[in-house]
């Protein structure tokens, strides 16, 4: 009987203590579950809100960056070296000392931008006698294959032209000339004098030969590895078309004079020649 009483007492104590322990554990579990639920809800909210909240900011940054890039590009397009020099001249022209002081920052930024553009240009090749010799050798070697074309040019004329071509090969200015510029120089040396002499005589075949000599000489004076065959042939073709037009025009004018009973009259270009 005493044992039963003791057991009952233990049960009572256990029952009294059990709810407290269970309650505390349950409370902590509920609190932890509540916090976990809050965190999960917050994460879900952030996951849902992130694209909406962040994307516009990103777009705004990208839009602002794009606008800035466009502004910089437009500014750089407008500030060519020639334009910058003109701007500097405008700043200092008729400016008082006080005005020069107020414009100092703008003048400095303009000078810095001008230097930046100059630094971006490719370096020029320095003059080298060996390069000049190689250009001359290429020119002389190329002319050997133009026997037929050169025969159309009077010997006395060609002697003068060749001397000028060699001087051009050995000059410093030829070093940094591209094909169009070289062709222009050669045209001034050969084509224009020949044109003044041959066109009044209606020697159009001669001028076609002169055109090929000019293009070939300009190619020969270029640097090693330069490919200008397409440009040269295009220029020759254009010249041939011009000469064909002149030939037809002269023939048409001659026929007009003939139909008017003036067939023995001297043509205007013949009088000029």
Image (tube, rainbow, N blue to C red):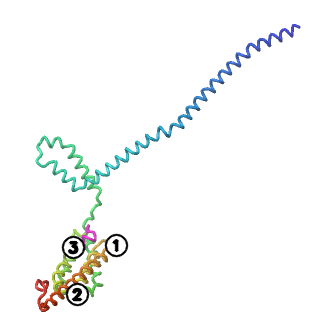
Q: Residue farthest to the top?
A: 2
Question: Magenta residues: mostly which secondary structure?
Answer: helix
Asked which secondary structure carries label 3, the reply is: helix
Q: Position of residue 59 (x, y in %)?
A: 43, 43
Q: Is residue 176 magenta?
A: yes
Quarter of the rendering containing residue 231: bottom left
Label 1 near label 3: C-beta < 8 Å?
no
Quarter of the rendering containing residue 22: top right
Quadrant containing the C terminus is bottom left
Residue at the spot 40% in from the left edge and 42% down from the top edge: 61
The alpha-carbon separation of the residues under discs 3 and 1 comes to: 19 Å
Q: For mark 3, what is the residue? A: 185
Residue at the spot 19% in from the left edge and 51% down from the top edge: 87
Label 3 vs 1, first from the N-terminus: 3
Q: For mark 2, what is the residue? A: 152
The alpha-carbon separation of the residues under discs 2 and 3 comes to: 21 Å
């Amino acid at each position: 009987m005493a044992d039963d009483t003791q057991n009952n007492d233990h049960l009572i104590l256990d029952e009294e203590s059990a709810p407290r322990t269970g309650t505390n554990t349950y409370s902590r579990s509920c609190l932890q579950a509540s916090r976990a639920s809050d965190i999960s809800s917050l994460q879900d909210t952030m996951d849902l809100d992130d694209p909406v909240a962040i994307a516009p900011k990103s777009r705004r940054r990208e839009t602002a960056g794009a606008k800035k890039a466009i502004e910089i590009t437009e500014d750089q397009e407008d500030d060519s070296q020639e334009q910058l020099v003109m701007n500097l001249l405008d700043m200092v022209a008729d400016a008082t000392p006080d005005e020069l002081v107020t414009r100092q920052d703008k003048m400095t930024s303009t000078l810095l931008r001008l230097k930046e553009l100059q630094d971006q240009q490719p370096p020029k090749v320095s003059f080298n006698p060996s390069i000049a010799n190689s250009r001359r050798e290429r020119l002389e070697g190329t002319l050997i294959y133009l026997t037929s074309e050169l025969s159309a040019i009077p010997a006395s004329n060609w002697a003068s032209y060749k001397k000028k071509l060699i001087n051009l090969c050995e000059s410093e200015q030829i070093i940094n000339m591209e094909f169009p510029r070289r062709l222009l120089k050669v045209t001034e040396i050969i084509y224009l004098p020949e044109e003044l002499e041959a066109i009044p005589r209606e020697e159009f075949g001669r001028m076609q030969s002169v055109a090929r000599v000019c293009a070939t000489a300009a190619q020969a004076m270029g640097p090693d590895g330069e490919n200008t065959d397409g440009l040269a042939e295009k220029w020759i073709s254009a010249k041939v078309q011009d000469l064909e037009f002149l030939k037809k025009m002269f023939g048409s004018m001659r026929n007009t004079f003939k139909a008017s009973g003036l067939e023995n009259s001297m043509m205007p270009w013949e009088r000029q020649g």
